[in-house]
Amino acid sequence: MQAYSQDLRERVLRALDRGDSPTEIARRFEVGRVWVREAIPATGATLRYLPPYSPDFNPIEKLFAKLKALLRKAAMRTTKTLWKQVGHLLNCFSTNECTNYFASSGYVCT
């Protein structure tokens, strides 16, 4: 039984090294997530939990908010004119503006 346990542990650690998530590993090897979480420090890694989803930390949400406001203002009423307007409006977003969306969301811009 101990040999099986050691083999299982080694396979889980290899999966962690590949970057698989603890939940994926727990499902694949039919072990508890707690067991996987306890195995993570053995790889030299640390487990970090993501914060709850927030549109404030997602740069695309900021762009979409502005795009939706511009589309409402344009008041296009047919699908064809709406898509044409979307294409036109997307060209209005400068590279600098998009970079600022990432920066204000906490991403490091290089």
Image (tube, rainbow, N blue to C red):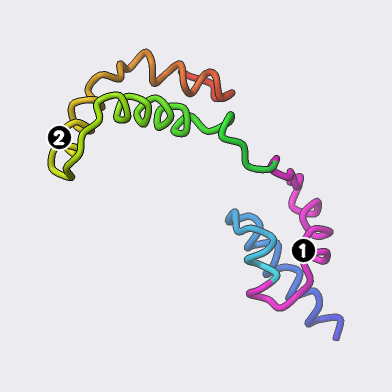
> Of helix, strand and loop, which one carries label 2?
helix
Q: Position of residue 5 (x, y in %)?
A: 81, 77
Up the image or down, 102 lies above or below 77; here it is above
| Residue at image point 21% right, 34% down | 76
Residue pointed to by mark 2 = 84
Instruction: Mark 2 and mark 1 in contact? Answer it, CB < 8 Å.
Output: no
Number of the label disc, if any, that sits on residue 24: none
Which label sits in the foreground, 2 or 1?
Answer: 2
Asked which quadrant contains residue 87, the reply is: top left
Q: Residue furthest top?
A: 96
Highlighted range, magenta: 27-51
The kind of residue tagged 1 is Val
Up the image or down, 93 lies above or below 58; here it is above
Whichever of callouts 2 and 1 sits on the residue coming sooner in the sequence is 1
Q: Categorize mark 2 by other alpha carbons within 10 Å: few (<14), some (14-19), many (20+).
A: few
Residue pointed to by mark 1 = 36
Relative depth, front residue between 31 and 67 = 67
Work out how far the residue at label 2 is from the one at label 1, CA to CA, in angstroms.
50 Å
Q: Is residue 73 left or right of residue 15?
A: left
